[in-house]
Amino acid sequence: MGILEVKGVGKRFGGLQALGDVNLSVAESTVHAIIGPNGAGKSTLLNCLVGKLIPDTGSVLFDGKSVLGRKPHEINQMGISRVFQTPEIFADLSVLENVMIPCFAKRDGAFRLHAIESVENEKSLQDKAEEMLADVNMLEKRNMLASALSRGDKRRLEMAMCLVQDPRLLLLDEPTAGMARADTNNTIDLLKEINDKRDITMCIIEHDMHVVFSLAERITVLAQGTPLVEDTPENIKGHPKVREAYLGEAQV
Amino acid sequence: MTDQTTDTGAVRASAPKTKAASGRVLGLGGKDLSLFLLVLGLALFAPFILNPFPEGSALSQFNAGYPDLMQRFVIFGIFAIGFNILFGLTGYLSFGHAAFLGVGSYAGIWMMKLLTTNVIPAIIGSIVVAGLFALIVGFISLRRSGIYFSILTLAFAMMSFALAYSVLTPITGGETGLQLKYFDPRILDAELAPGNPPRANLFGLNMTSSYELELGSWVFTFNAGYYLAAFMMLLAFYLSIRIFRSPFGMMLRAVKSNQNRLNYTGISSKPYTLAAFVISGMYAGLAGGLLVAMDTQVGAERMFWTASGEVVLMTILGGAGTLIGPVLGAGFIKYFENIISKINSTVLHDWFAFLPDGLENVVVAIIYPFVGKGWHLTLGLLFMLVVIFLPGGLVQGGQKLATVFRRDKNAGSVESDAAKKQPGHPGE
């Protein structure tokens, strides 16, 4: 039984069946990739996992508990963190504050009226955030405004914000979308590094084959809202159905 | 470490030359403490600072050191400080905050009518009732954001105004408003001597009592009501600094910056924004209560939408999201409202009497629309100039001046950073 169990999930938008009957199991401490052509339903599936959409049918269990009908912040509190296609950070806050907010969320829950205490007295959280920044090589930038960071650093910062919460599952939504090859490779290295250091469970939604085959241990191929196959990267590469549905003439 | 966490600016590890390193006083870091002491000094010595011109001189009409105006400075300062906690930190633009001020005033005057003319219960009552009202309005309005939130708050304020003006006349006095009367119950107070009107007091100290100090041709007025209001303003200002520097304040800034990320980080943004809304409503209630404590009367026009707009102007003019900006903005607007509006055509003719007659009339005719009843025109032009050239408000202007004089561009602060970050600033 995996940490994330998706069973018979279907979602319809008007006349469009975005997801048919998706079954998926993500085992703990693995990197699981979900690939598929445009319109395959990857993003819809991800949005069903994080509480942005509620599927019409089926169930999504995280660690044995249903996530359906829960709000994004509740799902995060269960231990699922999400990385967005374009980095979502607090652009008007400093890098250190960006990382401290998830620390507060982890320690204090979804709401606490700590209006009189000073942030400066939260030494332990500050240390934790700085440690995390050191881990992604951004410690010297801690006092910079996040909006002033380069695109690659914004991505690193967002990763740091997710990782500092020690999530049990990290969801990544096309983390290299729109990136130049060099940036993509940097992101792959970052993710590999994270995976080696932390033994974290990751679920990557991705379009870019290069990324998927460099990282994933298991791959699910989604096409037209239903999973075609689920297998190891080696087997997926040579799978005739996959070539037909997705890879086509792509060089892999 | 003290200089690191709360600063949102560019690299500034080089700035701890203030008292930051030597620990904290009252829980404030070095820069905040200096800012607080500055405001404390201004508030304490306002009767001197605002009366720079000798009595009877041509410039004495620019003196603002009389009790009524000084009280307005600090009371509207409180109003703007509270508004800034909501608008400056979370970015939610409420267009109905005058409703909380008005509700606070009504609650205050009823406390004085029913219980005692001592202002303490009145002020407490104002804060509590305005807070409860803000809880209801906020709970509903915060279901939406952006322009829809603004419109919802505006609708609530206009409903409150309409109710106070007509339907709820038995409670609010309708058009005539409410005043303290000789025959009010005042169950905690002793019987008044006949013919003695009830007066707002602090344990017997009359709010209108003043001490006048004559120094040469200067007259300085120290008013009990002003100092009570100034004390409250300092308390409110101190609390607002603490809120700005707290984890709660950080969450509010995160709401403004990226609410989506905040939700996906495990924070429920609604209770944070609602708490900010209620806190700023309580500030408005405090301001309303103090207004009543000073002049012991309320009218519904206090809740009119222009009053809500005024606090928005004050905050933006001073610098939204900065600590001291709202206080400056409130002082600026109230000064213009009271001083420029006093200048009439007789005064203008006096000023320009040295010019040849024909020219004098021309000059007066040109200036006249901008003063007296036309003071809004002057204020509007100034507001436009500030928004276009100093989107961060007066605080940004002060910061620019400071850099010119000090040539020390690294010494930014949260004030300048918040000021620089205003939307629409072409430099970003």
Image (spheres, coloured by chain):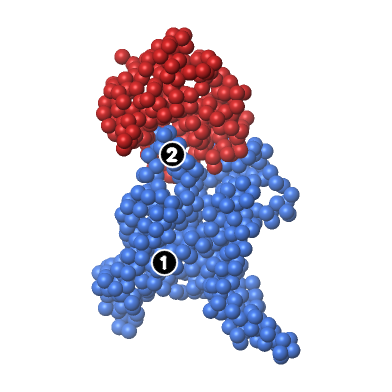
Which mark, residue A73? none
Q: Secondary structure at mark 2?
A: helix
- Residue type indicated by callout 2: Asn
- The residue closer to the viewer here, A161 or A206, is A206
How dense is the environment of label 1, judged by Cα within 10 Å: few (below 14), some, or many (20 and up)?
some
Q: Is residue B86 above or below residue B11?
A: below
For the residues labelled 2 and 1, the Cα–Cα distance comes to 31 Å
Chain A representation colour:
red
Q: Nearer the viewer, mark 2 or mark 1?
A: 2
A8 vs B425, left or right, is left
Q: Residue at x 41, y 64 (%)?
A: B98
Front position in the image: A212 or B86: A212
Quadrant including the N terminus of chain B: top right
SS for dot 1: helix
* Chain B: colour as depicted: blue
> Residue flagged by tag 1: what amino acid is it?
Trp
Residue at the spot of label 1:
B305
Q: Which residue is mark 2?
A: B260
* Chain to which the residue tagged by mark 2 belongs: B
Q: Nearer the viewer, residue A18 or B231?
A: A18
Residue that extends furthest to the bottom in the rendered view of this protein: B357
Q: Is residue B2 visible?
A: no
What residue appears at the point 45 percent right and 37 percent down from the top-left corner?
Answer: B261
Q: Where residue B106 sits: x, y (%)?
A: 33, 67
Classify residue B393 by image quadrant: bottom right
Please state the horizontal and vertical placement of residue B45, each as a whole percent of the image: 58, 65
Image quadrant assignment for residue B167: bottom left
Count all numbered tags in the image, as a single digit: 2
B38 left or right, relative to A202? right
Q: Chain of mark 1?
A: B
